[in-house]
């Protein structure tokens, strides 16, 4: 498995690299730290000279970054030039045959520890592989492995694929799987909002069904739990879940996205505002079961 880190010599870049270290140890994966630099735009400066200067500085940063990765893990640095950071990172991910893209979430945009900068936001609208967003401050964590995988799942298109991948992640990480059913917040269930008993009954049935599906795909005795989450808003519902350092949450890409492309839907975007754990956004037509370790 290969983790492609969209690296910058910033606190957000350090958060992304720290999360990549945690994921690499969990999944026995390689780390590929990638810096995307803008092409020469300075008049009267030879392109080759300017590019060489930028690349030299970037390589120094990458050398320092890779040196900070524990010796028991494999880390490599790569420099590429592109007008678009997101586009360049996607191209490098394809060239490296990367399985996941890891980025730091700190920056302008949404409020909260997973606030998105314009680059990350663009990436979440165009990446063909899952993107893992590291919350601000991940670099200060001492947790070495993923502790628990939470899958936020409803009945929208792509929910089965998301569950398949959550099962694979949990199995590969040897980490408990928690299924958080947000069906009471799903428009599919909106027609039931006037009947709270019907909402609760359908939510519990959905949660039980997903647990049975997950258990059937996992070894006997593998820890799988479920919870039905409700609230006046998405933020209110998700904030009711208990989280610990080392947890991560998996969500599906919006059904509005094109096949094999990400799109951060409104539910996931709202969840980002209140979460302090990494979020894995999975394209709705990507990562079939055999694609994960």
Image (cartoon, rainbow, N blue to C red):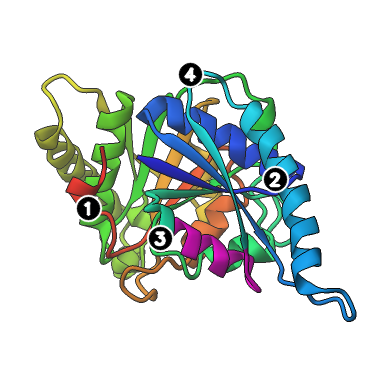
Q: Place residue 216 in its image quadrant.
A: top left
Task: Please name the residue shown 55% across and 35% down the image.
Answer: 19
Q: Residues within 10 Å of mark 3 (few under 14, many from 20)?
A: some
Residue 221 vertical position relative to residue 40 in the rendered view, above or below = above
Q: Evaluate if marks 1 and 4 touch, with contact meaning CB atoms under 8 Å apart.
A: no
Of circles 1 and 4, which is in front? 4
Task: Please name the residue shown 33% across and 34% down the image.
Answer: 178
Q: Residues within 10 Å of mark 2 (few under 14, many from 20)?
A: some
Q: Which residue is mark 2?
A: 59
Magenta stretch: give its range.
81-94
Q: Position of residue 213 (x, y in %)?
A: 13, 42
- Give the Cα distance between marks 1 and 4: 47 Å
Question: Secondary structure under badge 4?
Answer: loop
Q: Residues within 10 Å of mark 4 (few under 14, many from 20)?
A: few
Q: Position of residue 13 (x, y in %)?
A: 68, 44
- Give the Cα distance between marks 1 and 2: 55 Å
């Amino acid at each position: 498995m290969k983790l492609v880190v969209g690296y910058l010599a910033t606190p957000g870049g350090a958060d992304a690299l720290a999360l990549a270290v945690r994921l690499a140890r969990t999944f026995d994966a390689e780390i590929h730290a990638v810096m995307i630099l803008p092409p020469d735009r300075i008049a009267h400066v030879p392109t080759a000279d300017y590019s060489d200067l930028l690349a030299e500085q970037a390589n120094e940063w990458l050398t320092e970054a890779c040196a900070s990765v524990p010796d028991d893990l494999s880390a490599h640095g790569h420099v590429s030039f592109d007008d678009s950071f997101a586009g360049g990172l996607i191209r490098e991910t394809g060239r490296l045959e990367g399985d996941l893209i890891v980025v730091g979430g700190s920056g302008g945009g949404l409020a909260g520890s997973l606030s998105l900068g314009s680059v990350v936001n663009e990436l979440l609208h165009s990446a063909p592989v899952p993107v893992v967003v590291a919350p601000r401050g991940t670099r200060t964590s001492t947790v070495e492995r993923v502790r628990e995988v939470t899958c936020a799942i409803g009945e929208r298109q792509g929910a089965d694929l998301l569950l398949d991948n959550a099962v694979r992640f949990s199995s590969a990480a040897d980490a408990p799987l928690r299924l958080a059913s947000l069906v009471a917040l799903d428009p599919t269930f909106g027609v039931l909002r006037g009947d709270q008993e019907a909402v609760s009954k359908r939510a519990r049935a959905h949660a039980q069904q997903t647990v049975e599906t997950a258990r059937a795909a996992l070894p006997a005795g593998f820890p799988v739990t479920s919870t039905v989450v409700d609230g006046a808003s998405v933020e209110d519902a998700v904030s009711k879940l208990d989280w610990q350092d080392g947890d991560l949450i998996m969500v599906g890409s919006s059904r509005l996205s094109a096949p094999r492309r990400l799109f951060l839907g409104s539910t996931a975007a709202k969840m980002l505002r209140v979460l302090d754990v990494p979020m894995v956004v999975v394209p709705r037509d990507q990562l079939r079961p055999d694609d994960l370790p």
